[in-house]
Image: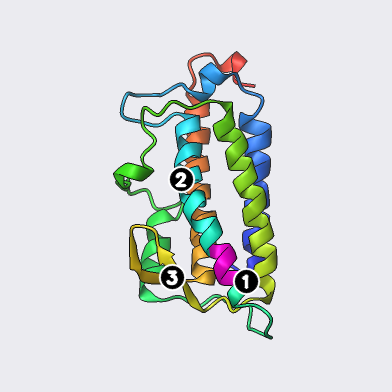
Amino acid sequence: MNTLEQLIRLASNQKHTVISSFAPMDLSLLLHKPAPDSWSILECLEHLNRYSRYYNPALAKAIASNSGGNFLQTISYSWLGKKSLDMVRPDNGKKNTTLKRMNPNDSQLGRQTLEEFLDHQTELLQLLDKAKGANLNKKAIPVEFFKLLKLRIGETLEFMVLHQERHLQQALRVKQHLPDKQNAA
């Protein structure tokens, strides 16, 4: 289980990783694919952007409408939340198939993908801070691919941070195996 403070630290570290590890790189290296069916660094970030475009506004709405009380800051988990978190944990080595609309493979991407990720990360950090005054255990976030199912606010925040960690680790592995490491920054 993660606390909001742990999630804030991890999300902040993720932002720093993108700034220090990927922002200085040449676009050609950010677009390099280790294999035709694997993702480049920018494709990893674009995948995360697609999730953020949906979940950040949903979280903002849910936090705003479930704030103002004196709530326990402990995240409790539903069955769906546990399943979702288990799938995206960075230490889960099982490869998951993503939904077609969330798969950025062969998308036309540029530096704006990286900038958008950093904007989303700033927004997520603000949401994590605002969540300190919200009911984290309120089922209020419709699941992106099946909106009749809802996740709790705390579960969704943790899902976002862990999902990002998983794909940032993937992007760092891509960087480690770039063909021209002296240009990798």
Asked if the stretch drawn in magenta spans residue 175, the answer is no
Q: Residue at x 56, y 17 (%)?
A: 181
Q: Residues within 10 Å of mark 3 (few under 14, many from 20)?
A: many
Q: Would residue 106 be found to the left or right of residue 162 on screen?
A: left
* Residue type beneath disc 1: Ala
Q: Residues within 10 Å of mark 2 (few under 14, many from 20)?
A: some
Vertical side of 144 occupied by 13: above or below: above
Number of numbered discs on residues: 3
* Residue type beneath disc 3: Leu
Q: Secondary structure at mark 3?
A: strand
Q: Nearer the viewer, residue 116 or 173?
A: 116
Say which residue label 1 marks.
Answer: 64
Say which label, 3 or 1, has the lower sequence index: 1
C-alpha separation, residue under disc 3 versus residue under disc 1:
16 Å
Can the viewer see residue 1? no
Q: Quadrant of residue 67?
A: bottom right
Can the viewer see residue 31? yes
- Where residue 146 appears, x then y in whole percent? 32, 62
C-alpha separation, residue under disc 1 versus residue under disc 2:
22 Å
* Residue type beneath disc 2: Arg
Do the residues bearing badges 3 and 1 touch, measured as CB atoms within 8 Å? no
Say which residue label 2 marks.
Answer: 50
Q: Quadrant of residue 60?
A: bottom right
Say which residue label 3 marks.
Answer: 151
Q: Nearer the viewer, mark 3 or mark 1?
A: 1
Q: Quadrant of the C terminus?
A: top right
